[in-house]
Image: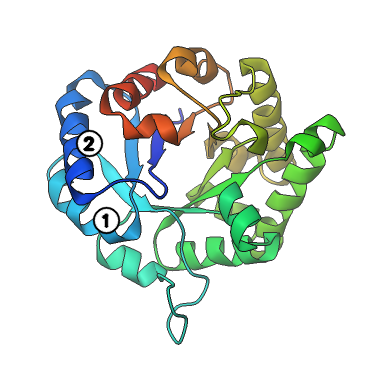
Amino acid sequence: MRRPLVAGNWKLNGSRESIQSLVNGLLNGMSQVNEAEVLVCPSFVYISDVAKQLEGSSIVFGGQDVAKEEVGAYTGEVSVAMLGDIGCSYTIVGHSERRALYGDSDKIVAEKFAAAQKGGVTPILCVGELLEEREAGETEKVVERQMQAVVDLVGVKALEKAVIAYEPVWAIGTGKTASPEQAQEVHAFIRSWINKEDASVADKVRILYGGSVKAANAKELFSQTDIDGGLIGGASLAADEFISICVAAG
């Protein structure tokens, strides 16, 4: 039985004051959450503050990205050792915004994935297609290419100690959401693709959906067979909304 995971990606949002208020709201609402694992990913500069607030709670925290390098002259980068040093359990790799805006290729994403695992932090591997790729019928081809880069580098067994997040790029921050059927179709494809390599890994790996998830559509999305939770953007910045999504995942 795969435990649902709901991860809040706060992106480039928040201040010390607003984040303290947000975390307080989450802590107050956690009594409603029975089954789902809850994760928040603040901006790097606020992770330590969030860690202190969450001490003793069941909410875990992580990074929004990680360097593929371990140490050295890489100005502005954050290594997996640094994430681990402050208690991060997870880090996102390959988010569509990193791929599109900062040039993270499939190769770079695979290297970041490998670095995270080597350093003991669980990677959340983001995969997904652009609108033009979906309209051209290339969704599965794109997702397979992104997955294959990771498997080629670290092997399919590595996915057993990872999380995958399917995020159709056309549904991120646009208000558009893949229908539950569209989302399930791609999640099922990902699981069947892994199954061809290793059935045990396919059965265990958690696959999240990301793309304009909100309280109003979460339950229907999460009820799909192969959807094991969500990677939540904007809705994770409102405590009540995010808690409602976490409840739906249970």
Q: On screen, 44 above or below 237?
A: below
The numbered mark, 1 or 2, whose residue comes first in the sequence reads 2
Residue 154 at least partly seen: no
Camera-side residue of 130 and 154:
130
| Circle 1 residues within 10 Å: few <14, some 14–19, many ≥20 | many
- Where, by quadrant of the figure, is residue 215 drawn? top left
Q: Quadrant of the N terminus?
A: top left
Rendering coords of residue 220 (x, y %): 52, 12
Determine the residue positioned at 54% across, 34% down: 173
Q: Position of residue 138 (x, y in %)?
A: 83, 38
- Please give the label number shown on residue 22: 2
Extreme residue in the bottom direction: 73
How far across and down, in percent of the image, does residue 7 sit? 40, 38
- Secondary-structure class at tag 1: helix
Could you say which is closer to the camera, residue 153 or residue 211? 211
Type of amino acid under label 2: Leu
Residue at 73 percent across and 40 percent down: it is 130
Residue that appears at 15% across and 35% down: 24
Can residue 225 be seen at all in this image of the molecule?
yes
